[in-house]
């Protein structure tokens, strides 16, 4: 009888502590997501001021333009080619940071509007890549790639890029690469060389 | 025996106390002009699916289940709904640019194709929200058409 009582007590206690803990967790998550929405808010609304004050230190020496965004995108692409989920997630999160400090004030107002739209969309995809499984990362990479192509159309590129595509993945999917050789980010080693060069984007910076 | 009694009392007290913690109710009666159904006016069968299986979390109005009267269930729901609306709020559909709409539609298609949505934790209790193969096919077809009509 005593044993039963002790077991019940342990059960009850662990239930209580679990409940308390899970409440805490969800609170923390709430807080995190709050921060999150604030961050995206910052990125959409007041792009420059606050970041100059707060983020410059941590981003010392980091470029605040499309070049950095493209560089992160390429790191992400390589990770997907290698079917490396963790590296892809890391690159996705890095890209969120570069998109956040992307300085668009030098563009015309219609270009700024378009770029802002691209940044919001790309940020969402990069965020998801930062916390998802491989297949989901690749889904988001497709739309992210479209965003990058549209971005490059406005910003130009200082290195020649190749727009490549694979007809098999999701009824045809494109991506950007620094090299002419096909290395398929949608399938990795399963179908590494599936695809063709659609277009060469010449440097015009 | 005394020990057991104390624990039960504490547990009971905690349970009672948390009932007094308020949660934010997601129950706006205003449907803004930007609402997905208003803007796109989908056929009735699509409308019904969206309302039954999606709108409870992805809009400003939740048809709350009875267990929302009880903590900690209400906290759990509140958290879920907040997150869901952050991802996609059908009420605010037309605030999105074509690029963003296209992005969201693609995500909807993928989520349904891969059985990620509606969440299994939701359909477990809300059997009506579960999508049949035909319903899935219909909604994917409709969403794809809508996506193709956009320029992105």
Image (tube, rainbow, N blue to C red):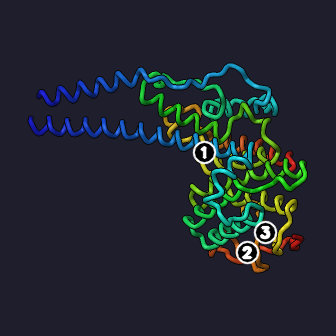
Q: Could you give the CA–CA distance between mark 2 and mark 3, rounded to whole angstroms?
A: 8 Å
Q: Chain of mark 1?
A: A
Q: Is residue A12 above or below residue B104?
A: above
Q: CA distance from mark 2 to mark 1?
A: 37 Å
Q: Is residue B73 left or right of residue A81?
A: left
As drawn, is B125 to the left or to the right of A22?
Answer: right
Instruction: Give the mark nearer the N terminus: 2 vs 1.
Output: 1
Eye-nearest disc, 2 or 1: 1
Residue A186 makes an appearance in the image: no
Question: Can residue A150 be spotted in the picture?
Answer: yes
* Viewer-side residue, A91 vs B91: A91
Foreground tag (2 vs 3): 3
Point out the image quarter for the N terminus of chain A.
top left
**Residue A129 image offset from top left, x and y in percent:** 62, 57
Residue indicated by mark 3:
A165
What residue did someone put label 1 on?
A: A36
- Crowd class of label 3 (few under 14; some 14 to 19; many from 20; radius 10 Å): many
Confirm whether circles 2 and 1 share one chain: yes
- Give the residue number, with chain letter if any, for mark 2: A194
> Which residue shows up at 40% across the image and 40% down it?
A22
Q: Chain of mark 2?
A: A
Q: Residue at x 81, y 70 (%)?
A: A163
């Amino acid at each position: 009888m005593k044993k039963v009582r002790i077991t019940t007590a342990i059960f009850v206690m662990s239930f209580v502590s679990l409940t308390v803990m899970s409440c805490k967790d969800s609170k923390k998550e709430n807080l995190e997501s709050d921060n999150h929405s604030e961050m995206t808010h910052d990125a959409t609304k007041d792009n420059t001021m606050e970041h100059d004050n707060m983020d410059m230190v941590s981003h010392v020496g980091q470029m605040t333009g499309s070049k950095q965004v493209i560089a992160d995108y390429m790191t992400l692409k390589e990770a997907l080619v290698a079917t490396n989920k963790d590296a892809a997630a890391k690159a996705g999160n890095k890209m969120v940071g570069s998109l956040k400090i992307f300085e668009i004030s030098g563009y015309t107002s219609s270009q700024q509007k378009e770029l802002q739209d691209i940044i919001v969309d790309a940020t969402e995809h990069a965020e998801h890549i930062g916390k998802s499984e491989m297949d989901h990362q690749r889904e988001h990479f497709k739309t992210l790639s479209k965003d990058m192509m549209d971005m490059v159309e406005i910003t130009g590129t200082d290195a020649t890029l190749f727009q490549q595509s694979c007809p098999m993945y999701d009824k045809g999917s494109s991506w950007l690469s620094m090299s002419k050789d096909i290395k398929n980010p949608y399938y990795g080693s399963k179908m590494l060389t599936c695809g063709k060069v659609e277009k060469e984007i010449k440097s015009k910076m | 025996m005394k020990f057991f009694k104390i624990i039960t009392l504490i547990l009971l007290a905690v349970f009672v106390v948390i009932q007094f913690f308020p949660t934010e109710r997601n129950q706006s009666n205003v449907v803004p002009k930007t609402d997905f159904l208003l803007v796109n006016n989908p056929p009735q069968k699509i409308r019904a699916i969206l309302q039954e299986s999606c709108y409870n979390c992805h809009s400003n109005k939740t048809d709350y289940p009875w267990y929302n009267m009880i903590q900690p269930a209400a906290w759990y729901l509140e958290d879920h709904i907040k997150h869901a609306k952050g991802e996609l709020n059908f009420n605010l559909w037309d605030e999105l640019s074509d690029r963003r709409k296209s992005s969201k539609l693609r995500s909807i298609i993928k989520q349904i194709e891969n059985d990620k949505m509606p969440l299994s934790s939701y359909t477990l209790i809300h059997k009506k929200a579960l999508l049949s193969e035909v319903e899935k096919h219909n909604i994917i077809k409709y969403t794809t058409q809508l996506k193709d009509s956009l320029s992105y």
